[in-house]
Image (cartoon, rainbow, N blue to C red):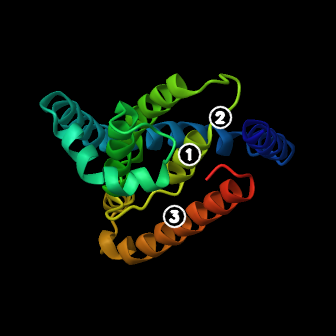
Amino acid sequence: MVNIIWGVFILVGIVYSLINGNIMEINNVILQSGKDGFNLIKEIAPLLVIWMGLMRIAETSGLIKRIAEIMTPILSKLFPKIPKGHESIGYIASNVAVNMAGLDSAATPFGLKAMEKLQELNTDKKRATTSMITFLVLNTAGVTLIPTTIISLRMMYGSENPTIVIPACLIATLSAQIGGLTLDYLIRRKNGNS
């Protein structure tokens, strides 16, 4: 649906520019947008590669398992239907840890792996389990302690104080996390799935 909305916006903008005779402006914007997109990828890609590499090392060395053990008491309260010691908890813990570092894109592989492992526990493969829904809420509203990507973007565009957004991001993510998990719990309890 969002793709359709953006497609309509783009088409309306192009048609409006053609009607007003701003064809050169369209060309300039298209070329500048391509250049800006390439520069953005060039600036953020090394950061993501480093974190994804570190996460791979952490996974291979057993650090992910250790993080999962530390976070298990908290996560077991959020995910009471996941059997103790199931490997999905490790991936969920990793996803949460990387999201806390503000590296949403680097957290994606852990999130996908967690969902894959949660799907293995699912008896009705066409319907999400309460654990899957809770993980989706946890992942979507994840608490970001250090918004690394935002800070990188602010640095890239010449901000004088790129870290000034940290308190606002922390308040926003904590509010989203508390609100999302509270609503998830209330709905599960209402439906008898707590």
Q: Amino acid at mark 2?
A: Ala
Q: Is residue 117 left or right of residue 24?
A: left
Q: Which mark is residue 177?
A: 3
Determine crowd level at label 2: few under 14, some 14-19, many 20+ residues with C-alpha closer than 10 A: some
Residue 39 shows up from this direction: no
| Residue at x 52%, y 57% (from the top left corner) | 141
Q: Position of residue 156 (x, y in %)?
A: 33, 56
Where is residue 152, by image quadrant?
bottom left
- Reading the chain from its start, which is encountered first: label 1 or label 3? 1
Q: Mark 2 or 1, which is nearer the eye?
A: 2
Badges 2 and 3: C-beta atoms under 8 Å apart?
no
Q: Which residue is mark 1?
A: 136
Q: Position of residue 155 (x, y in %)?
A: 31, 61
Is 77 drawn above or below residue 33 in the view shown? below
Q: Is residue 148 left or right of residue 119?
A: left
Q: Which mark is residue 128?
A: 2
Q: Position of residue 83 (x, y in %)?
A: 42, 36
Q: Is residue 150 left or right of residue 48?
A: right
Determine crowd level at label 1: few under 14, some 14-19, many 20+ residues with C-alpha closer than 10 A: some
Q: Amino acid at mark 3?
A: Gln
Where is residue 127, by image quadrant?
top right
Q: Mark 2 or 3, which is nearer the eye?
A: 2
Q: Which mark is residue 38?
A: none
- Reading the chain from its start, which is encountered first: label 2 or label 3? 2
Q: Amino acid at mark 1?
A: Leu
Badges 2 and 1: C-beta atoms under 8 Å apart?
yes
The image shows a total of numbered marks equal to 3
- Reading the chain from its start, which is encountered first: label 2 or label 1? 2
Q: Secondary structure at mark 1?
A: helix
Q: Secondary structure at mark 3?
A: helix
